[in-house]
Amino acid sequence: MSPPLFDRIAVADWSASASPKTGPDSIWIAVVEDGSCTLSNPPTRRVALGEMAALAEPGRRTLLGVDFSLGFPSGTAERAGLVGVPWAALWSHLGASITDDEQNRNNRFDVAQRLNDSMAARWQRPQRPAGPFWGCPPSKANASLTTTKPNRAQGWPPEWRIVEQQLRSDGRRPFSCWQLLGAGAVGSQSLVGIAALERLRQILGQRLAVWPFDTGLDMPPVTDLVVAEVWPSLWDVTVPIGVVKDAAQVEATARRLTHLDASGELEALFRPRIDEGMESTVVDEEGWVLGVVGSGN
């Protein structure tokens, strides 16, 4: 049997909290190395970003799974007027637009509203529709960004990415990246998470590879840190009494991926079965969830 692909595997459960927070519904990072797991609960995204940067240790290859969307549905970047490879254009835009200070104060709702406005520019006021981002505190609501889900306008990017369509066809219930607020919503985590990873890319350069954007639908090349999207709900997790669910999930997911690596099964997860006509959409814009094997999953 071939040796493991990674020296250690980390999984991060992200948070879009607007103030420092620990415990339930905050950031948890599990790192499994040499059979043992280390858990951390950084109170802010700034602290978490520092911990993730430290995982890029020369000579030790690390896989970092993050539980937020790394891409948006096909056509998002183009509709927003962004130029270039769609995923990279959107990452660059979010990295430059989102402010996120040492106390977790951030402007994600303002950025979402501006993206809504950009995507609605083809319509003349007052006929411009709300969305596609939705879900915000009443104080942030306006004609463009609403507190509840608006009717989807013809011409909006799809509600679901291809991988989420696959999960739904398998009976799973992922949330749409357009929903920013509410129980289970992932949109806000994706906005601030992508912005954080874009800053990490600027720090680490070629020492970091994002699957599948930098790598294609294949095993990532040798580099210090490989980032991939994960969905801990893919696997059943038993949460012991008194243990925070998020903490239990990141540890269980990191251990599961470590087991798959040790048994030689992890490499296949980097090569999901995707219809040939959809591969470029996945690689250039939407991304994929590590562990979803594709058609027939």
Image (cartoon, helix red, strand yellow):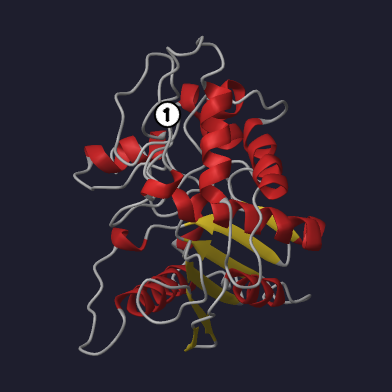
Identify whether 52 is placed above or below 231: below
Q: Is residue 86 above or below residue 56?
A: above
Q: Can you say whether 243 is above or below 203 in the image? A: below
- Label 1: which secondary element: loop
Image quadrant assignment for residue 142: top left
Left or right: 168 as drawn, with respect to 31: left
Residue 290 locus on image (x, y percent) = 45, 53
Amino acid on which disc 1 is placed = Ala
Who's the residue at 24% across and 67% down the image? 236
Q: Report whether 75 appears left or right of 204.
A: left
Viewer-proximal residue among 231 and 95: 95
Vertical comparison of 41 with 16: above or below: below
* Apparent side of residue 279 relative to residue 199 in the rendered image (left or right): left
**Residue 19 locus on image (x, y percent):** 51, 71
Question: Within the image, what quadrant is residue 178 found in?
Answer: top left
Image quadrant containing the C terminus: top left
The residue tagged 1 is 143
Left or right, 130 with respect to 5, comes to left
Q: Nearer the viewer, residue 295 or 4?
A: 295
Give the residue drawn at x 57%, y 74%.
44
Point out residue 123 in the picture as x, y percentages from the top left corner.
Answer: 50, 11
Q: Nearer the viewer, residue 130 or 76?
A: 130
Residue 102: percent from left, percent from top: 65, 72
Outermost residue on the front side: it is: 139
